[in-house]
Each structure stands twice: as C-alpha cells, then as structure tokens.
Amino acid sequence: MIPITKHLGRYFSLISLISVLIITILSNVGMNIFFTRYLQNAQRSQDQTIVSYVEDLAEQEGFTPLTLMGIEHYAFTMSAEVILEDPSGKVILGTSDPQGVEKGKTSREDYMDSSKYLYRIYPMVIKGSSQGSLLIGRPQSIFAVKEDRMFLLTINGIYLLAAMISLSIGFLLRHKVSGNFLRPIFAIQENTRVIEQGAYDAVKPVSSRTIELNALSDSINTMALQLKEQEHLRRRLTADMAHELRTPLSTINSHLEAIIDGVWEATPERLAILQEEIARLTGLMKDLGDLNYLESGEIRLQVQEVDLTLLVGSVLENFHPIFHAQGKKLEAELQEGLMIKGDKDRLTQILVNLLSNGLKYTNSGGRVQVILKRSPQGILLEVRDDGIGISTQDLPFIFERLYRGDRSRSRESGGKGIGLTITRALVEAHDGRIWVTSEEGKGTSVFVELPEK
Ligand SMILES: Nc1ncnc2c1ncn2[C@@H]1O[C@H](COP(=O)(O)OP(=O)(O)OP(=O)(O)O)[C@@H](O)[C@H]1O
Ligand SMILES: [Mg+2]
C-alpha cells in the first residue's frame, strides 16, 4: 500500500506525459501533411519562376557557357536541382554535376537521383516553338532541407519543454491536491474512531467541497446518531427489564419472608396476591418470547380469507361491557365487506392491543372510535381516542420493547410497554404498516394499513 500523495503524483505524471505525447504525435503528423503540401505549392510557383528565367535567357542570349552558369546559380539559390535538355532530348546542363556534359553525360538519367528528389518536367516554349525541356528536382522529404528540419526539431523541443513543465507542476501540485482530499478524509477517520469509542457526541461535522466525501461524512454522522439512539434504548431496556422484574420479585419475597417468620398467616388471599405477581411475570416472559419469535421473521401465520368488518365488529362487541363499566364510550364506523388474507387470531390480537390502549389511556367519560374503511393502498383501520395523548419526546419510541410513556401511570394501569411492539410485528407480518399521531392532552390515533385481498 502507498500513500495517496504518491498515487496522485503518479497519475499526474502519467496524464501529463500521455497528453504531451499525443499532442506531439498528432501535430507532427499534421505538420508533415500540411507543411509538405504548403512546401509543394511554394515549390511549384518557384519552379515557374525558374522556367520563366530560363526561357527569358534562352530568348535573349541563347544557351552560352555564361548563361548556363547563371542558370546553375539561380537553381542553387532556389534549392532546386535543374536538368536542361535541348529539343532532341540531349542534356545541356545538369546542376548535380555541372561538368557532366563535358564528360559525355547526355542522358537525364545520368543526373537524376529519384531516391532523394522528386522531378517535375516543364516544356520550354519560346515564340511558339519548343526549345527542349526543363526538369526541376525537389527533395522528397521535408526533412531533407536543413531549415525545415530545424523548424521541426524546434517545435518538438518546445513540446518536450512543455512535458517537463507540466510534469513539474503536477509534482508540485500533488501535495496541495491530495491535501484537499485528505483533510476531510482524516476528519472522517477521526469521527469513526470517536464512534468506535462510543463517544457519539464528540462526532464533528466535516465540510468538504467533494460531493462524495460530504455524503460519506453525512452517512457516518447519521450512523453515529442511530447508534447513540440504539445505545440509549438498550440502556433503557435493561433498566426497564430490571424494574419490571424487581417490583414483583420483591413483593413476592417480602410476603414469603413474613409468612416464613410467622408474622403472616398464609391465607388464600395472600397467596392469591403472590400468584398474581407470578402470573404477571410469566405473562411478561411469554410476551417477550412471543415478540422475539415474531421479530425473528419465522412467524407462521394461519392465513385465510377474513372478513375484517365482521372480525372488528365481534371484537368491539366483547369490549363494550368493559368500556361501559368504566364509563367510557366505544363507537364504530365500519365499511361493509372488507376482505383480507390474514391470520384471524393475530388480527384479533392487533385490535385487542389497540383497544386496550384506548381504554387504558382515556379518562372516565372518554371516547374511543374505531373506523374501518377502504384506502388507496388497501384497508385502513383507525383507533382514535380523546385520552391523555403521547408527548412528542415519547412518540418516536412507543414501538420499542418495554417502552412506556408515563411510567408511573402506565404501571398503575398494568402496562408492560410491549403491546405496541407486538402489534407492529404482527402488522408487518401481514405486509401492512402502522403509525401513530398524537397530541398530549387531546388524544391519539393509531392507524393500521393492510393490503386488501
Ligand atoms: N392510545 C394511547 N394513548 C396514550 N398513550 C399511549 C396510547 N397507546 C400507547 N401509548 C403509550 O405508548 C406506550 C407503549 O404502549 P404499549 O401498548 O406498547 O405498552 P403498554 O400499553 O404500556 O403496555 P402493554 O404491553 O400491556 O400494552 C404506553 O406506555 C403509553 O405511554
Ligand atoms: Mg398497550
């Protein structure tokens, strides 16, 4: 493994090298094509000047040793190879070997070097009659001419310089760039270390101009918040659990002590109190066991077609006497014939839990309404009461195990704080969802939405 600075340094160097290489290759190829074309055009017009020059000389003075020398000179200044032939095709001047004619070289092949030069033939016409022809040779490649070669070398030298400059800039910048990345990464790393130690409040916000790093930091901070909440719930659950167990156990213990010490006689009434406490504990254990089973996802529902309207109606029927006895009203508004696929007993359990809460958390004279109707997503059951309501602090937690809003009051009413947890698990097992709206002192509405058959 290597540090990010080195990584970035390597990438920067590689990218600048590749880009300079590509520019060099492309511009060399381009220059070869366009420069050659430009040179050829320039040479053609130069050729014309040479032809006119030779024609003028021939017309005015004919080809004398002096005029031939003038032509040779002129060709040299134009960087051209010239071969002059008379009308019979015999060479009278070849600038590649000015003394060639005297040595008996009379054919154009004696002077031509086609591997190095490209020859163009121009007929010489003076006053309408042919005066032979002029062959003008030019270098095949632009590299053959020194000035052109120098021009190309200079351009490529500039590219090499550019490569070196961009490499050095990349080398210098790598610390700055990697610093920009690294600073937030280090801060995020520090946050995860803090979370690891459980100091969730010490998590600091990290600001970065990189979207991805911001998103990473945000999710880590959200995770810290969730962990903190989980931790809080876990502590509260342990405390609640201890409390739940301690109270009945100490009641049982003190009663038994008094009986053993002979202070109390073990009357059936006293033993009944003990049995009640034991039943309460057993009930709590059963509920917790039930909940674990429900939440494990292994729950097996006895699914059948259920007329929810009828089912709700019959549960309400059973509750009427209890409400009546406590001076509370129980009202219903049920849409007819709402069918779902579900477990009859579990659906009954959902309703019993919600109605028990409605009963428990309304004062005398209170009212609980049950509304069952079709909704866009399926069937909506609402259990609404005008009771004590739930505080905004408690509202997010009421579905947690053993969570009870007002502890003293719900203990008085015998609540274990597990009813809604079980209810939610049952609703979700039916592919439904449950939510609560409430206002402290005004009342509560629990909504259960289930998919229609
Ligand atoms: N209709 C309601 N009105 C006011 N508070 C409610 C209502 N329903 C639930 N709560 C609050 O939510 C908490 C959790 O409810 P839940 O039904 O899970 O537990 P419980 O009623 O206390 O005990 P149990 O396990 O016996 O049902 C309650 O303690 C209470 O504070
Ligand atoms: Mg309850």
Image (cartoon, grey):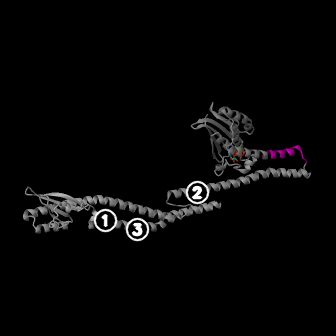
In the rendered structure, find residue 164 and report the number of the disc placed on it.
3
Mark-to-mark CA distance, 2 and 3: 42 Å
The segment highlighted magenta reads 265-280
Which is in the foreground here, disc 2 or disc 3? 3
Between residue 400 and residue 107, name the one nearer to us: 107
Q: Is the residue under label 3 in contact with that under label 2 (CB below 8 Å)?
A: no
> Mark 1 vs mark 3: which is more N-terminal?
1
For the N terminus, the quadrant is: bottom right
Q: Is the residue under label 3 in contact with that under label 1 (CB below 8 Å)?
A: no
Which is in the foreground here, disc 1 or disc 3? 1
| 372 w.r.t. 415: above or below | above
Is the stretch drawn in magenta largely helix, strand or loop? Answer: helix
Q: SS at mark 3?
A: helix
**Rendering coords of residue 167 (x, y %):** 42, 66
Q: Residues within 10 Å of mark 2 (few under 14, many from 20)?
A: some
In the rendered structure, find residue 152 and report the number of the disc placed on it.
1
